[in-house]
């Protein structure tokens, strides 16, 4: 791939790029930058969210601006306040070595007179939301009649939000001879109409296919009955202890209700919707970026413009009314070359929408069952074991060790391990050991390539994300090591310290023989046939595009039996059991309030079984 030095950028930009740590341009940057630097032209660039579009238009724009002329030379329109501020900050970083170049953001929710004052002092580049921009034009607070460049970023989102009239009015106030650069993830009719009415023979740049989905994102759907939708959401969260996700609902009411249920059940969650004040919205986003919130429940409008790195999952609690909107939802994960997972919880009546979305994103969904209770317990158990292994010891505890050792001196090592883990784990297994299957049957799509239940074997392997694997790299590793074809390894689920994958039953002997004799960087690989139901069942089919679901490890999260109560709550109903369990409130060692459910029962030997299955 070409380096930035080969794209024609000047020395000032190359210095800024070096400071930012950029090494190689993305595909849209590689295609757009030389073209925009070479000549003044109109372009339509189609690329998914998170592919580096800001730099694709930002670098050439900065190089073309005359910093000695303090008049406004360029206007960038973006759909939301968050994206407006993000673009402004990035343009400022890119132009840090160019003296005299000023970029000003104008958006609703802030002082319009203060923003006008910044423009009067000189702003060669204005980044604006359509509504505030039109307001300032109407008040004669800004002059864009002589600009040279107009950029429409996330054009389809702006039009979906109802800004068509504002955009056309703004464009009508700009000179005809300017260059217009339109960047969009999809190309609906409204975007095509803008291109036809306000652009002159635009050149087209397409990264991937028109309206297609991000290839780094795997797509899964889970079929449940309507009454089990929320319970399914909780299980998907529990099956991914380090989840960092955006959960989409259709309405503000559902968004608030789901967030409140998650908070009451002990998850670190928050709602983001149009009824929040700007201060509340800013507070939620600050907490989410800082990973104090792991599950952000949002409406489509409120989530537009969110640009947060390393989101592991997008969860469609409800599918959008317009299937094209799914592309934007799933684009929140799998950014900057990283892999991610988009999950859809649906009922039988919504199955037809899956096929519609597949045609738009040009990718296949994998149908999966809601994780069983025993599978979730196994995942959480190993997550807990890894947390214990990796915890940093505060040596202030050393003074108390003699007394602690005296209390525990008569307990054998194996028994002590079981007791220590059971302190955290009993609550979890007591909830899930009698849980019923949530996956709906009878609605499965039957397609060519479907694997019958007795034709697939699910394996457990003792490597995972802590070994620098995600679902793509593990799948490639397995195919290469076992010398298998593209579709011979499927349903790859990567957890923190272990993973699951499926093969046809005929390949099981080869898998066991080859991998159990294999070492990875001096570590012996252990593979066993999984005891959980993650690979079987009537509601599963082959992953047509060879993708599984990545589970990336990350900050926060952890064992769902004990979660931080972010909103200050310390009690409430335990919705897992459906009844009232009392919460005992105490202060933990780090001063964080936690809600702890009453303990009881034993691990039913599960820890013994799981420990044996993880031999290395």
Image (cartoon, rainbow, N blue to C red):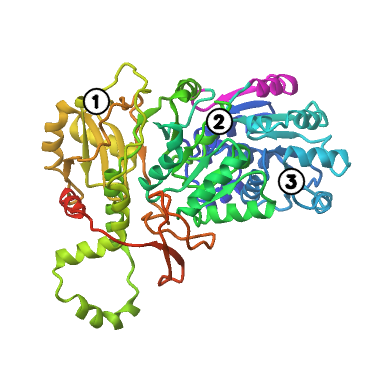
Q: Secondary structure at mark 1?
A: loop
Taking the image as shown, residue 509 lies to the left or right of residue 317, namely left
User: Which labelled disc corresponds to residue 1?
Assistant: none
Task: Return the x and y of residue 237 as percentages of the image width and height.
Answer: 41, 46
Which quadrant of the rendered structure holds the N terminus?
Answer: top left
- Tag shown at residue 485: 1
Residue for badge 2: 320
In terms of depth relative to the viewer, which is nearer, 133 or 296?
296
User: Can the viewer see residue 73?
Assistant: no
Q: What segment is highlighted magenta in the picture?
A: 189-209
Q: Is residue 206 magenta?
A: yes
Residue neighbourhood size for the residue with mark 3, other residues' Cα within 10 Å, grouped as few (<14), some (14–19), many (≥20) = many
Spatial CA span between label 2 and label 1: 36 Å
Distance (Cα) linking label 1 and label 3: 52 Å
Residue at (57%, 30%) from the top-left corner?
185
Q: Earlier in the sequence, mark 1 or mark 3?
A: 3
Q: Residue furthest front?
A: 579
Task: Note whether 386 is above or below 495 in the view shown.
Answer: below
Q: Is residue 3 left or right of residue 178?
A: left
Of 17 and 80, which appears nearest the observer? 80
Label 2: how many residues lie within 10 Å, few (<14), some (14-19) or many (20+)?
Answer: some
Q: Position of residue 79 (x, y in %)?
A: 67, 38
Compare marks 2 and 1 and give the one earlier in the sequence.
2
Q: Give the quadrant of residue 588.
A: bottom left
Residue beneath label 3, please? Answer: 107
State which quadrant residue 234 falls in.
top left
What's the distance in space between the residues labelled 3 and 2, CA to CA? 27 Å
Residue 505 relative to residue 166: left or right? left
Question: Tag 1: Cα neighbours inside 10 Å, few (<14), some, or many (≥20)?
Answer: few
């Amino acid at each position: 791939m070409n380096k930035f030095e080969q794209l024609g950028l000047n020395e000032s930009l190359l210095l800024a790029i070096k400071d930012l740590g950029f090494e190689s341009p993305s595909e849209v940057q590689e295609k757009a930058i030389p073209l925009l630097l070479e000549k003044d032209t109109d372009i339509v660039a189609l690329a998914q969210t998170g592919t580096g579009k800001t730099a694709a238009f930002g670098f050439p724009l900065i190089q073309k601006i005359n910093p000695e002329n303090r008049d406004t030379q360029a206007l960038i329109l973006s759909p939301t306040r968050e994206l407006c501020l993000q673009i402004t900050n990035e343009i400022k970083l890119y132009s840090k070595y160019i003296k005299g170049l000023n970029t000003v953001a104008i958006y609703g929710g802030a002082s319009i007179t203060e923003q006008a004052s910044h423009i009067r002092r000189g702003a060669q580049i204005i980044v604006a939301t359509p509504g505030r921009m039109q307001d300032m034009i109407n008040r004669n607070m800004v002059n864009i009649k002589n600009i040279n460049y107009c950029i429409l970023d996330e054009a389809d989102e702006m039009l979906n939000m109802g800004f068509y009239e504002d955009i056309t009015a703004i464009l009508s106030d700009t000179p005809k001879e300017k260059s217009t650069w339109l960047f969009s993830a999809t190309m609906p009719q409204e975007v095509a109409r803008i291109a036809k009415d306000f652009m002159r023979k635009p050149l087209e740049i397409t990264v991937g296919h028109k309206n297609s989905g991000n290839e780094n994102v795997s797509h899964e759907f889970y079929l449940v009955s309507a009454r089990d939708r929320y319970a399914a959401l909780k299980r998907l969260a529990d099956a991914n202890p380090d989840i960092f996700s955006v959960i989409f609902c259709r309405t503000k009411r559902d968004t608030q209700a789901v967030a409140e249920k998650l908070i009451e059940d002990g998850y670190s969650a928050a709602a983001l919707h149009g009824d929040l004040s700007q201060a509340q919205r800013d507070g939620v986003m600050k907490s989410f970026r800082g990973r104090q919130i792991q599950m952000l429940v949002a409406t489509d409008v409120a989530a537009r413009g969110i640009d947060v790195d390393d989101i592991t999952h997008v969860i469609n609690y409800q599918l959008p009314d317009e299937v094209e909107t799914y592309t934007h939802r799933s684009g929140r994960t799998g950014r900057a070359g990283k892999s991610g997972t988009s999950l859809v919880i649906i009922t039988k009546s919504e199955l037809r929408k899956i096929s519609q979305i597949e045609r738009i994103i040009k990718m296949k969904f994998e149908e999966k069952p809601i994780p069983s209770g025993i599978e979730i317990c196994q995942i959480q158990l190993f997550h807990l074991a890894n947390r214990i292994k990796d915890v940093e010891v505060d040596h202030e505890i050393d003074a108390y060790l003699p007394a602690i050792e005296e209390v525990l001196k008569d307990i054998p090592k194996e028994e002590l391990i079981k007791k220590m883990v059971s302190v955290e784990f009993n609550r979890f297994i007591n909830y899930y050991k009698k849980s019923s299957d949530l996956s709906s049957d009878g609605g499965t799509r039957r397609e060519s390539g479907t694997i019958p239940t007795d034709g697939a074997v699910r394996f457990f392997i003792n490597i995972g994300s802590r070994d620098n694997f995600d679902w793509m790299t593990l799948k490639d590793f397995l195919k290469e090591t076992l010398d298998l074809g593209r579709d011979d390894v499927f349903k790859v689920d990567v957890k923190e310290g272990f993973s699951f994958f499926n093969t046809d039953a005929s390949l099981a002997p080869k898998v066991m023989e080859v991998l159990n004799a294999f070492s990875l960087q001096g570590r012996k690989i252990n593979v066993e046939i999984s005891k959980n139901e993650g690979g079987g069942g009537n509601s599963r089919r082959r992953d047509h595009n060879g993708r599984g679901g990545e589970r990336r490890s990350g900050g926060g999260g952890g064992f769902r039996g004990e979660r931080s109560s972010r909103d200050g709550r310390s009690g409430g109903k335990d919705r897992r059991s459906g009844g009232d369990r009392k919460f005992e409130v105490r202060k933990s060692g780090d001063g964080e309030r936690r809600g702890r459910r009453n303990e009881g029962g034993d691990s039913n030997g599960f820890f013994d079984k799981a420990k044996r299955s993880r031999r290395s």
